[in-house]
Amino acid sequence: MEINLTAVELGGRLFARPTALMLLGLTLLAFTGGAMDIQNPLLRPTVEAVIVPARWFLAGLSGCGALWFAWRLLLLYRWENGADGGCHRCGGFVRHLEGRWGDYSKCMMCGGTKSGHH
């Protein structure tokens, strides 16, 4: 069995943060589900006033992670099907960043950097 470490690194670079955002939102959403089972009638309105908006926020957080994941999946699909992304090494898509010594471009596929925006 042969493992392509380049593909594993590429998958980690592209999909680790969106997946972590989705899982964080879903995990916290699952943990806050039991907070609504309070039997005390005096505490219930206060807990509902805090937990319900927090659950909506966490659902939105998971949704944002899913959209980010889908966007990265679309970038990977386009890159694998020959759309030119701008990287001079691998042809992958680049992010334009600002650093200590000026503007630079960083490839989202291979991790290479080049000074200036391309």
Image: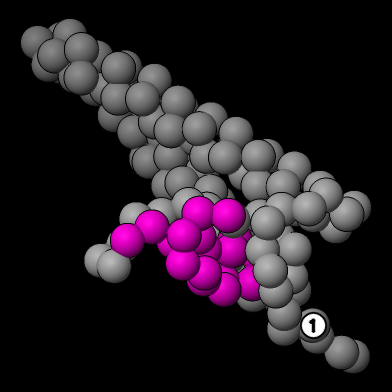
Amino acid on which the number 1 mark rests in the picture:
Asn
**Would residue 13 be visible to someone looking at this image?**
yes
Residue 99, horizontal then vertical, whole percent:
31, 62
Residue located beneath label 1 in the image: 4
Colour pattern: one colour
Measuring 52% from the left and 39% from the top, which residue is drawn there?
65
Residue 30, horizontal then vertical, whole percent:
44, 38
Q: Is residue 1 above or below residue 58?
A: below
- For label 1, the SS is loop
Q: How many numbered discs, if any?
A: 1
Q: Is residue 32 above or below residue 3?
A: above
Question: Could you say which is closer to the camera, residue 36 or residue 118?
Answer: 118
Left or right of residue 32: residue 95: right
Residue 92, horizontal then vertical, whole percent:
71, 60
Measuring 66% from the left and 63% from the top, which residue is drawn there?
87
Measuring 17% from the left and 9% from the top, which residue is drawn there?
45
Q: Is residue 106 above or below residue 27?
A: below
Say if the magenta span includes residue 110: yes
**Would residue 10 be visible to someone looking at this image?**
no
Q: Name the quadrant containing residue 71.
A: top right
In the image, which residues are magenta?
102-118
Q: Is residue 85 above or below residue 91?
A: above
Quarter of the image with the C terminus in it: bottom right
Question: Could you say which is closer to the camera, residue 57 or residue 80?
Answer: 80
Quarter of the image with the N terminus in it: bottom right
Left or right of residue 52: residue 42: left
Left or right of residue 34: residue 89: right
Measuring 52% from the left and 69% from the top, which residue is drawn there?
114
Residue 101, horizontal then vertical, whole percent:
29, 67
Q: Residue furthest bottom?
A: 1
Q: Name the quadrant containing residue 80.
A: bottom right
